[in-house]
């Protein structure tokens, strides 16, 4: 079954505890809660695998990747590993499905992790694909390859991360970044949400062009 991608999914993390989980926002319909998570969890980004119609959620507090059908139900703990855990603030933070794997940044450890989806649908071994990206809040792939952009929240930067893990800063506060929290790529444009909660100045959506070869 293929999932209608016009539907939108949102993680729920506010009080009271029974609200923690996942919500669905059907176009023109009524928002509904479709999955619950433990009260001490912190879902922090969700991604849809369109081939399997399964949703994957990063949990920043429990160091877990949860999985649940896009139609809703009881989430299962798909992956849990030390690489996903926090070391003081937040661990797994952001998530993308890319080329048969789940990719998750870890904010505290400054890493980008790749977890293969096996032929049985289970989680393969966690691979560390990049390091040195402390305060990373989200990632987005620039194309079909493994080159990605990383939002570095506290430093007001976006870094270009190549498949070998090498990095170049491509956007800074001078370009309008204020606590970038999320990234999405459409064609040759990257859209960046600015939380702006440190300076409490101008939360906004910033668009930038991806140059050929990046």
Image: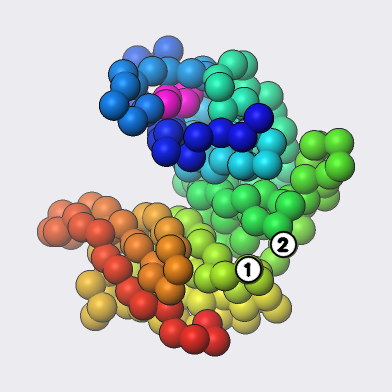
Q: Does residue 83 appear in this view?
A: yes
- Residue at image position (59%, 16%) is 73
Q: Position of residue 93 (x, y in %)?
A: 51, 48
**146 or 30: which is nearer to us?**
30
- Furthest-left residue in this view: 201
- Residue that numbered label 1 is attached to: 144
Q: At numbered mark 2, what does the secondary structure look like: helix, strand or loop?
A: strand
Q: Position of residue 128 (x, y in %)?
A: 72, 62
What segment is highlighted magenta in the picture?
Answer: 20-24
Contact (Cβ within 8 Å) of mark 1 with mark 2: no
- Residue at image position (39%, 67%) is 190
Q: Image quadrant of residue 105?
A: bottom right
Which numbered marker is on residue 153? none
Label located before the other in sequence (1 or 2): 2
Q: Is residue 203 left or right of residue 127?
A: left
Q: How is the image coloured?
A: rainbow
Q: Image quadrant of residue 10?
A: top left
Separation (CA) of disc 1 from disc 2? 19 Å
Q: Is residue 132 left or right of residue 183?
A: right
Q: Image quadrant of residue 132?
A: bottom right
- Residue that numbered label 2 is attached to: 128
Disc 2: CA contacts within 10 A as few (<14), some (14-19) or many (>=20): some
Magenta-span inclusion, residue 42: no
Overall secondary structure of the magenta stretch? strand
Disc 1: CA contacts within 10 A as few (<14), some (14-19) or many (>=20): few
Q: Position of residue 52 (x, y in %)?
A: 69, 36
């Amino acid at each position: 079954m293929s999932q209608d991608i016009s539907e939108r999914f949102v993680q729920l993390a506010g009080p009271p505890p029974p609200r923690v989980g996942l919500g669905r926002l059907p176009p023109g319909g009524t928002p509904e809660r479709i999955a619950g998570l433990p009260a001490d969890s912190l879902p922090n980004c969700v991604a849809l695998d369109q081939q399997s119609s399964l949703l994957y959620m990063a949990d920043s507090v429990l160091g877990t990747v949860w999985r649940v059908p896009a139609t809703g139900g009881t989430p299962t703990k798909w992956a849990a590993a030390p690489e996903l855990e926090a070391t003081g603030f937040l661990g797994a933070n952001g998530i993308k499905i890319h080329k048969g794997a789940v990719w998750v940044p870890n904010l505290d450890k400054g890493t980008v992790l790749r977890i293969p989806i096996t032929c049985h649908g289970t989680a393969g071994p966690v691979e560390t694909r990049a390091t040195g990206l402390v305060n990373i809040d989200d990632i987005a792939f620039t194309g079909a390859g493994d080159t990605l952009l990383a939002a570095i929240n506290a430093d007001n930067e976006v870094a270009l991360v190549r498949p070998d893990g090498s990095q170049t800063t491509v956007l800074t506060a001078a370009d309008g970044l204020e606590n970038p929290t999320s990234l999405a790529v459409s064609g040759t444009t990257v859209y960046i949400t600015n939380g702006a909660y440190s300076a409490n100045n101008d939360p906004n959506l910033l668009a930038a062009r991806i140059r050929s070869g990046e």
